[in-house]
Amino acid sequence: MKVVLGIYLIICLKGLFTPTLCDASISTHDIQLKLHNTYVFTLDFKNQSTADEIVTLEVQHKDILKLNRSEFNVSDYVNTVLPVQVTAVGAGHSDIYANSTTNKTDLRDIYLRVTVFKNDGLNTFSSVIGWIYFVAWSISFYPQIYINWKRKSVVGLNFDFIALNIVGFCLYSLFNLGLFYIPEIKDEYSHRYPRGLNPVKTNDIVFSVHAACATLLTIIQCSLYERNEQRVSTTARTILGIFGVFILISIIISAAGVIHWLDFLYYCSYVKLTITLIKYVPQAYMNYKRKSTIGWSIGNIFLDFTGGMLSMLQMIVDSYNYDDWVSIFGDPTKFGLGLFSVAFDIFFIIQHYVLYRHSNYETDYK
Ligand SMILES: *[C@@H]1O[C@H](CO)[C@@H](O)[C@H](O)[C@H]1NC(C)=O
Ligand SMILES: *[C@@H]1O[C@H](CO)[C@@H](O)[C@H](O)[C@H]1NC(C)=O
Ligand SMILES: *[C@@H]1O[C@H](CO)[C@@H](O)[C@H](O)[C@H]1NC(C)=O
Ligand SMILES: *[C@@H]1O[C@H](CO)[C@@H](O)[C@H](O)[C@H]1NC(C)=O
Ligand SMILES: *[C@@H]1O[C@H](CO)[C@@H](O)[C@H](O)[C@H]1NC(C)=O
C-alpha cells in the first residue's frame, strides 16, 4: 500500500499552508464520521487553462464511503468552490484521492483521510482512556523518586534499569521531536507517505521528554543518596556500548547522505523498542538475588500496569469501533509490547506480594 502511495513523488504538504502553490485544493484532509452520517467537503480549482481535463475522485474502500458525485470537468469549476458530499456506509479507515485523465492539474493536495466509527460513546470512551493512560504512565516515575527521597537511599533500585531507561527515553524523545519539529524530516515523511498521518502527537512529545527528565532526576538521586556497591553492570555497559556504536554508525551514514535522517530516527526508535523489551530483566533478577523488593517501588509498577492495560483496552475498543482488527492485531508490535510490559508488571507484583513478602515486612522502609 505504502509503495503505491509512494508514487506521488513530490509532496504538496506546503499546500496546507500556502494553498496557492497547488492548482487544486480541498477544504480538509482529515475527518471522523459516524456510520451512516454525511459530510460535505469542498474542492477548489484555481484559474488555469485545462479544458478537456476530467478529474475523478477515487475512494479507496468503496464499502466504507460513497460520494454523491465523483467526476468533474475541471473547466466547468475553475475559480468556483465545488461541494461534494461523502456518506459513511461502513466502519473503518478510507482515503479519498483524485485522479485525472490528463494529469495537467496538480492534484496532490486533493486527498481526504476518513475514519468512520460505529458509536459516539465508544469514540469518547477511547479518547478518555487515552488521556488516562497518558497520565498513568507519566506519573509512574514519581513513586520511585518519592521512596528514594524518603529512604535517602537507592539500594534496591537497579542501576542497569535506570541506565537503559535514560538511553531509551532520550532516543524516543529524539524520534518524536525530529518527526514533529524538523521540517526536512517532516517533508521526507510526507514524501514517502504522501497521505500518511504524522505518527507523532503532542502527547508523545510531552510524555517522552518528561520521562527523560524524570529518569534524569532519578539518576541525580542515585549520585546523592546511599547506594552501597551498586553500579551499572558490565553486561549493561556492553549492551549500551553496542547500541552506541550502532547509533554512531547511523549518524555517520546519515551525515554522508547514504540514508536519510528519517531512517536514522527510525533506527533510534528500534533501539528504544529493544530497550523496552530488556529493561526490566536486571531489576527482576536483582530482586530474585536479594529475595526482596525493598527499594523498588511497587507504585511505579501499578501505574505502569494500569497504563498498559488501558492502552490495550483502547486498541480493542478502536478495533471494534473502526471495524479494523487487522491494522491493530496484524501489527503485533504495539499490542505485543503492551502485553509484554503488563506481563513483567504482574511478575513484579508477584515478587513483591507473594515471593518476597516476608522480607518486605521485616525490614520495611528505613
Ligand atoms: C485566468 O487565466 C487566464 C489565462 O490563463 C487569464 O487571461 C485571466 O485573466 C485569469 N483570470 C484570473 C481571475 O486570474
Ligand atoms: C469540459 O468542458 C468544456 C467547457 O464546458 C468543454 O469544452 C469540454 O469539451 C469538456 N470536456 C469534456 C471531456 O467533457
Ligand atoms: C452533492 O452534495 C452537495 C452538498 O450537499 C451538493 O451541493 C451537490 O449539488 C451534490 N451533487 C450532486 C450531483 O448531487
Ligand atoms: C488514474 O486514471 C487512469 C485512467 O484515467 C487509470 O489508468 C489509473 O489507474 C488511475 N490511477 C489511480 C491511482 O487510480
Ligand atoms: C496520472 O497520474 C497517475 C498517478 O501518477 C497515474 O496512475 C495515471 O496513469 C496518470 N494518467 C495519465 C493519463 O497519464
Image (spheres, rainbow, N blue to C red):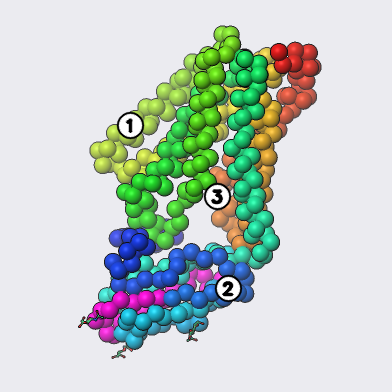
Which residue is the site of mark 1? 249
Label 3 sits on residue: 331
Q: Position of residue 7 (x, y in %)?
A: 34, 62
Q: Earlier in the sequence, mark 3 or mark 2?
A: 2
Residue at 78% across, 20% down: 357
Q: Residue 354: percent from the left, percent from the top? A: 78, 24
- Secondary element at image label 3: loop
Q: CA distance from mark 2 to mark 1?
A: 48 Å
- Which amino acid type corresponds to the residue marked 3 in the rendered image? Asp
Question: Is 350 drawn above or below residue 288 in the view shown?
Answer: below
Under mark 2, the amino acid is Ala
Judge from the rendering whether residue 334 lies leftward or rightward of residue 55; answer left or right: right
Residue stretch rendered in magenta on the structure: 43-64
Residue 297 shows in the view: yes
Residue 262 lies in quadrant: top left
Callout 1: helix, strand or loop? helix
Q: Are marks 3 and 2 in contact (CB under 8 Å)?
A: no
Label tally: 3
Q: Tell me how far mark 1 sits from mark 3, CA to CA.
A: 28 Å
